[in-house]
């Protein structure tokens, strides 16, 4: 995980008493609900600029991975051509021997049937199948990997079908938009402490047609018995206006403590009628969604015809290390 503490700049506090009270109320709300929407805190023109840069990086990585897949398929195809040629020669020898009377008169072909091939990329730890070579379709990022960290790379993970998280090239200074925002950083520090660090920066792309995710938390509790204060949080920066059509992030308010033993705690909340309604806030460009790593949430279906890109910044207390969300292997290995 990337440690980016040098970009967490501390700004001079010139707030009014009213602004201080408002921000303290927001922090209290965050601790109660597990999430917070901060509206109109970033310049929209900068967000729009970053959308172009981020999607260019996404498309660049897609091209790299498709080229790697094509190379692997070509290599496998060459191996199969050699095996096919060897089979043809063997069959020809058998046929020649039969015609001249020197063979046994019984066909004993040793090859396997030839035809179109589908299977795993050569040498890849993946359940993702390559497309049938006779199939006419446009390849995309989803065709280059499976789902989950076991089948993906440290540069990009497919979390769910057509839903990707990509740290690739996100460490550039131009993407430090949140760390340059005193308003957001004050709130982050009030929650995590002045010594908080950035442990991840990434781009999440929900492709057109991506379905609802399962409910989940991004990380574990640090205690099996106690509800400790937030030790890690995400800040989502939408690069397009997030609406009910293109798939907002849904959150179960007040569910941080439930994530420790989800089935049991969910049942208790239902019996006691304390389960709170789902929140699915629409977040426009220039606003951010902040939530506790442990709160229950999910990405929802993108029913639009366009991708829904969101920048993700993960902040944590300095002792916390996330070893769960990205693999170690690289696209470039």
Image (cartoon, rainbow, N blue to C red):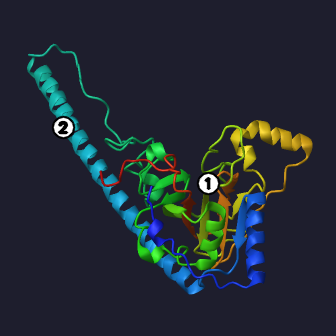
- Which residue is labeled 1 in the image? 231
| Disc 2 to disc 1, C-alpha distance | 61 Å
Residue 42 appears anywhere in the view:
yes
Q: Residue at x 55, y 61 (%)?
A: 314
Q: Quadrant of residue 284?
A: bottom right
Please provide percent x and percent y for residue 159.
55, 52
| Closer to the camera in the image, 203 or 314 | 314
| Closer to the camera in the image, 9 or 323 | 9
Q: Residue furthest top?
A: 104
| Closer to the camera in the image, 318 or 235 | 318
Circle nearer the N terminus (2, 1): 2
| In the displayed structure image, the side of residue 256 where residue 11 appears, left or right | left
- Which residue is labeled 2 in the image? 85
Q: Is residue 15 above or below residue 163?
A: below
Q: Residue at x 34, y 53 (%)?
A: 69
- Name the secondary structure under disc 1: loop
Please provide percent x and percent y for residue 12.
58, 82
Please provide percent x and percent y for residue 42.
60, 81
Q: Are marks 2 and 1 in contact (CB under 8 Å)?
A: no
Pointer 2 local density, CA inside 10 Å: few below 14, some 14–19, many at least 20 = few
Residue 128 appears anywhere in the view:
no
Counting the numbered discs, the total is: 2
- Name the secondary structure under disc 2: helix
| In the displayed structure image, the side of residue 257 where residue 151 appears, left or right | left
**Front: mark 2 or 1:** 1
Mark carried by residue 244: none
Pointer 1 local density, CA inside 10 Å: few below 14, some 14–19, many at least 20 = many
| In the displayed structure image, the side of residue 260 where residue 160 appears, left or right | left
Quadrant in which the N terminus is drawn? bottom left
Please provide percent x and percent y for residue 120.
38, 41
Q: Residue at x 73, y 40 (%)?
A: 262
């Amino acid at each position: 995980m990337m440690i980016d503490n040098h970009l967490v700049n501390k700004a001079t506090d010139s707030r009014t008493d009213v602004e201080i009270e408002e921000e303290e109320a927001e922090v209290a709300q965050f601790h109660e609900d597990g999430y917070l929407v901060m509206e109109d805190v970033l310049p929209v023109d900068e967000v729009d600029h970053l959308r172009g840069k981020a999607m260019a990086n996404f498309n660049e990585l897609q091209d790299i991975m498709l080229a790697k897949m094509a190379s692997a398929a070509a290599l496998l195809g060459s191996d199969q051509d050699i095996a096919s040629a060897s089979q043809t020669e063997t069959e020809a020898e058998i046929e020649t021997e039969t015609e001249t009377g020197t063979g046994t008169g019984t066909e004993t072909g040793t090859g396997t049937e030839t035809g179109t091939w589908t299977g795993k990329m050569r040498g890849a730890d993946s359940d993702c199948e390559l497309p049938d070579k006779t199939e006419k379709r446009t390849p995309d990022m989803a065709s280059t990997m499976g789902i989950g960290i076991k089948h993906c790379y440290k540069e990009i993970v497919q979390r769910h079908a057509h839903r990707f998280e990509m740290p690739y090239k996100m460490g550039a200074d131009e993407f430090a938009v949140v760390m340059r925002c005193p308003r957001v950083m004050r709130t982050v520090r009030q929650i995590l402490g002045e010594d908080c660090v950035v442990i991840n920066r990434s781009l999440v792309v929900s492709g057109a047609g991506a379905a609802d995710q399962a409910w989940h938390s991004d990380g574990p509790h640090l205690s099996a018995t106690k509800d400790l204060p937030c030790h890690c949080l995400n800040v989502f920066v939408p690069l397009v206006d997030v609406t009910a059509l293109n798939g907002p992030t849904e959150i179960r308010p007040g569910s941080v403590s439930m994530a420790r033993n989800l089935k049991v705690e969910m049942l208790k909340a239902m019996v006691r009628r304390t389960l709170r309604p789902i929140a699915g806030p629409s977040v426009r460009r220039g606003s951010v969604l902040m939530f506790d790593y442990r709160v229950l949430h999910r990405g929802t279906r993108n029913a639009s015809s366009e991708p829904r890109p969101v920048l993700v910044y993960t902040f944590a207390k300095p002792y916390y290390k996330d070893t769960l969300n990205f693999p170690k292997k690289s696209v470039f290995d």
